[in-house]
Image (cartoon, helix red, strand yellow):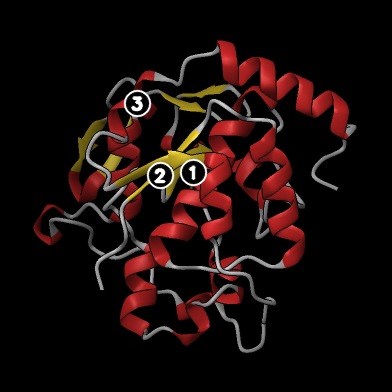
Amino acid sequence: MVKALTRTVLTAALVLLSLTAPAPAHAQDRSAAAAYTLPITAAVPLLPLAAEVRDGYERTSFKHWNAGRNPSDGCNTRAEVLLAEAVDAPAILPGCKLSGGRWWSYYDSKWLTSASALDVDHMVPLAEAWDSGASQWTAQRREAYANDLGTPTSLVAVSAASNRSKADQDPAEWLPSVVEVTCRYTSEWIATKLRWGLSVDATESEALTQIAEACPATTVTYEPAPL
């Protein structure tokens, strides 16, 4: 099941939202530099279809968080995401400790005012990435994936509660609790898989196809990750 809603109700709600609700301003801004933009219904068939394989997975296979863009500033990848996504910027204390600030967790529509209340979510979780092809990557490429600052949709600051509810589930198993962001979330999931050449299994592909059909005005924007 795509979610604990009937398919008819979900489809009707998403069609209405995708036709009437503009994308958030920051979502529009971050798509500007991407290499490819296509309708979500055209993006789903581009995802390679393959069975998932969890054998050998360990979270430590993906080194994170690393030193980020500027190792000399003391801010690791997690801190850089929090700084980039802050609606009201926090103070940066010694050791890149963040004090104050304000963030919007789009998964559950909550304002958060403490960096410790946020998780930086891998849009496609590490375990899911492993299942979908990352098990065949080098350690260096897995590190690059786990610390991907090359596009704002790979890593997203959200409430710890919503991130832990999601865990390592794909959109066939979990979607944000706020129906209004389903199209956006699914677009960003697809974009991440296309960016990194990750596959989908049959159940995931079916769920993505159903959601895509309910989001006719939604596009997917992505730039292939560097080799």
At label 2, which amino acid type do we have?
A: Thr
| Residue in front for this viewpoint, 59 or 182 | 182
Q: Residue at x 35, y 39 (%)?
A: 82
> Label 1 belongs to which residue?
188
CB under 8 Å between discs 1 and 2: yes
Horizontal side of residue 184 vs 137, given as left or right: right
The image's mark for residue 221 is none
| Residue in front for this viewpoint, 55 or 43 | 43
How far apart in space, not on screen, are marks 3 and 2 (Cα)? 12 Å
Q: Quadrant of residue 5?
A: top right
> Label 3 belongs to which residue?
28
Q: Count neighbours of disc 3 (C-alpha within 10 A) and say few if under 14, some if 14 to 19, many if 20 or more.
A: few
- The quadrant of the picture occupied by the C terminus is bottom left
Residue 103, given in percent of the width and then of the height, sits at 43, 26
How far apart in space, not on screen, are marks 1 and 3 (Cα)? 12 Å
Dot 3 lies on which element? helix
How far apart in space, not on screen, are marks 1 and 2 (Cα)? 6 Å
Residue 100 visible within the image = no
Q: Count neighbours of disc 2 (C-alpha within 10 A) and say few if under 14, some if 14 to 19, many if 20 or more.
A: many
Q: Earlier in the sequence, mark 1 or mark 3?
A: 3
Dot 1 lies on which element? helix
| Residue in front for this viewpoint, 95 or 80 | 80
Q: Residue at x 52, y 83 (%)?
A: 135
> Label 2 belongs to which residue?
153
Where is 40 relative to 130, above or below?
above
Q: Quadrant of residue 201?
A: bottom right
At label 1, which amino acid type do we have?
A: Glu
Q: Residue at x 54, y 29 (%)?
A: 106
Q: Earlier in the sequence, mark 1 or mark 2?
A: 2
Residue 81, given in percent of the width and then of the height, sits at 33, 44
Where is 105 relative to 139, above or below?
above
Q: Nearer the viewer, mark 3 or mark 2?
A: 3
